[in-house]
Amino acid sequence: MRSGVTRLKAFPRNRLLDVELVRGRVSELDLLAAFDEPTTVRDRRDAEPAFFWDLEWPCGLVMDLTFHQLSEELRVRLDATEIDHALRHLGFRIDELERLDQRDPEAFRAAGEPTELVWGLWCHDDDDTLRLVAAGLAERDARCWLDELRRDGDLRHELRHMP
């Protein structure tokens, strides 16, 4: 199981946006290796078997993963419109990736409060030159990334608001 992630015991319906923000094809083995056994399983004769993982990351990002076993389709719902943040946490390849912000920008805007992507992660190189590592980040994603680096002992990074 990925470090720090919490498996929620109940489906966090009241904390998630009503739409799937990401979908694509993944390996069942990748999901099991990353998150262990699913939170719940649907295995009825009248429906494709599906596995569900309800997760919360240390940064507060809540994620609902629905995996349809036969089609190998993964559908992702989140508590905010932070798609890049969620994909970074998943950390495995998603084939045929479809993002709602690219597929249907109007539906994406209607999904929830748009997250401002105005933060940058910077690194002080050995000669103390400040170098941009990542730009266009949501604040929670930027702080999450910085916290992960600091937990690993890397103190050379800092965040900056980029208006």
Image (tube, helix red, strand yellow):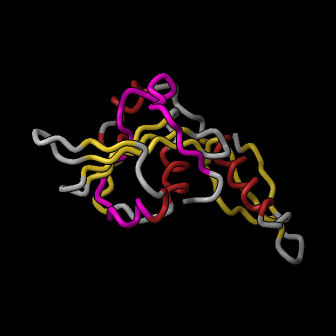
Task: Indicate the quadrant containing the N terminus: top left, top right, bottom left or bottom right.
Answer: bottom right
Residue lying at the far bottom of the rendered structure: 126
For the residue pair 119 and 25, the one nearer the viewer reads as 25
Residue 101 visible, this orientation: no
Q: Quadrant of residue 121?
A: bottom right
For the residue pair 78 and 40, the one nearer the viewer reads as 40
Q: Quadrant of residue 101?
A: top left
**Residue 131 in magenta stretch:** no
Q: Position of residue 136 (x, y in %)?
A: 60, 48
**Count of marks, rendered view:** 0
Magenta residue span: 5-32
Q: Position of residue 51 (x, y in %)?
A: 32, 48
Residue under the point 70% across and 51% down: 120
Residue under the point 44% across and 28% down: 17
In the rendered structure, the answer to whether residue 139 lies left or right of residue 73 reads right
In the rendered structure, the answer to whether residue 84 lies left or right of residue 111 reads right
Task: Indicate the quadrant containing the C terminus: top left, top right, bottom left or bottom right.
Answer: top right
Residue under the point 52% across and 33% down: 80
Residue 29 visible, this orientation: yes
Q: Is residue 42 above or below residue 159?
A: above
Q: Position of residue 32 (x, y in %)?
A: 41, 61
Residue under the point 28% across and 58% down: 25
Residue lying at the far left of the rendered structure: 46
For the residue pair 49 and 112, the one nearer the viewer reads as 49
Q: Is residue 34 above or below residue 104?
A: below
In the rendered structure, the answer to whether residue 157 lies left or right of residue 32 reads right
**Residue 11 in magenta stretch:** yes
Q: Quadrant of residue 19?
A: top left
